[in-house]
Image (tube, rainbow, N blue to C red):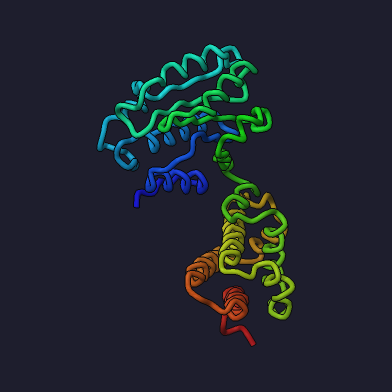
Amino acid sequence: MNEVVIEKQPILSRILSKINNSLSSVQAYLLVGSNEEDLKKYSLLFTKVLVCPNKYSDNCSKCNICSRMSSGNFSELKIIEPLNGVIKKEEIIKLRNSFQTQSVEGKNQVYIIRDVELLNLSAANSLLKFLEEPDSNTIAIFTTTNLNAVINTITSRCQVIKLNNNNINNGFDLVKNISNLDEEQINIVLEFLFTIENNEVRAISKIKELFMDYFDTKELLKSSFSVILLAYKDALNYKIFENMEYFNNETGIKNISKNQSIDIIIKKISFILENIQKLEYNVNITLFLSNVIIGIGEITYGKSNRN
């Protein structure tokens, strides 16, 4: 299989891999993101997957088409950008005229319209006519940083792909991005962790209402354990650097850091990583969580000191 994998962009990766392996695509795509440079980069990658006569792969070297697209010297790729904050009808007419013949070199002819929300009304109407009478191998890629400003009649004719924000590099948003959990779920995980740290017996006796009612599948367990892992990493960060990377001075994490040695925190990080790996196999969730709670306690207090 020829997978197209883009870090932190699972939706885009899945769509591009499907196109690359099935040779099927829709007529128009709308990429939505917050970063102009990312939109330019991913729209060009999208084009390579659509056009390359071989199945596209990273650093594709089976043809010179991909390298020509990268350098802007491929005639069957047309790119339209706003001029003075607007895209005019004349640009769309010129585009339509340039696609009067079938693709000669690549699998498809592609045009990219950047900042598609900046089409004026006459340009948008002209584009709609083009979309309604498509050539079988002509595909559109539109980009925007403001989906709400794109004309609805254009949006409705596209497969909309919302990009993840790659500018997220620290803080609570990064925890959400890594774990695929929302803020409420993350806070539930943290409260359960702090209960384990402060009162192991209560954590085991209340395991269902404190945790299992919210995280009852293997995938949710993996996500919740990724939060626990980040919490212990931040406890270590605070211990060494007096700073947190993920949780912005969370009091419970500070308490773990202050009350435990570097060696114990590192052991807990390793322990959580080991248990994340165990989740690849079938486990009894109740027994698994009970063992994790007991294991954290044994690391904290030492097996020989337990009753």
One can see residue 301 in this view: no
Q: What residue is rendered at 57% in x and 53% in y?
A: 178
In the image, 46 versus 207, the foreground residue is 46
Whether residue 68 sits left or right of residue 122 in the image: it is: left
- Kindly give the residue lying farthest to the bottom in the view shown: 307
- Kindly give the residue lying farthest to the front in the view shown: 133
Q: Quadrant of residue 221?
A: bottom right
Q: Quadrant of residue 46?
A: top left
> Does residue 13 sit above or below 195 in this rendering?
above
> Does residue 158 sit above or below 242 in this rendering?
above
Q: Quadrant of residue 285?
A: bottom right
| Rendered location of residue 266, percent (x, y) | 53, 64
> Looking at the figure, which quarter contains the C terminus?
bottom right
In the image, 217 versus 132, the foreground residue is 132
Q: What residue is rendered at 52% in x and 19% in y?
A: 81
In the image, 304 versus 107, the foreground residue is 107
In the image, 51 versus 287, the foreground residue is 51
Whether residue 197 sits left or right of residue 291 in the image: it is: right
| Rendered location of residue 262, percent (x, y) | 55, 63
Whether residue 192 sits left or right of residue 284 in the image: it is: right
Q: What residue is rendered at 64% in x and 70% in y?
A: 216
| Rendered location of residue 166, percent (x, y) | 54, 40
Q: What residue is rendered at 52% in x and 24% in y?
A: 130
| Rendered location of residue 104, percent (x, y) | 30, 26
One can see residue 15 in this view: yes
> Does residue 84 sit above or below 185 in this rendering?
above
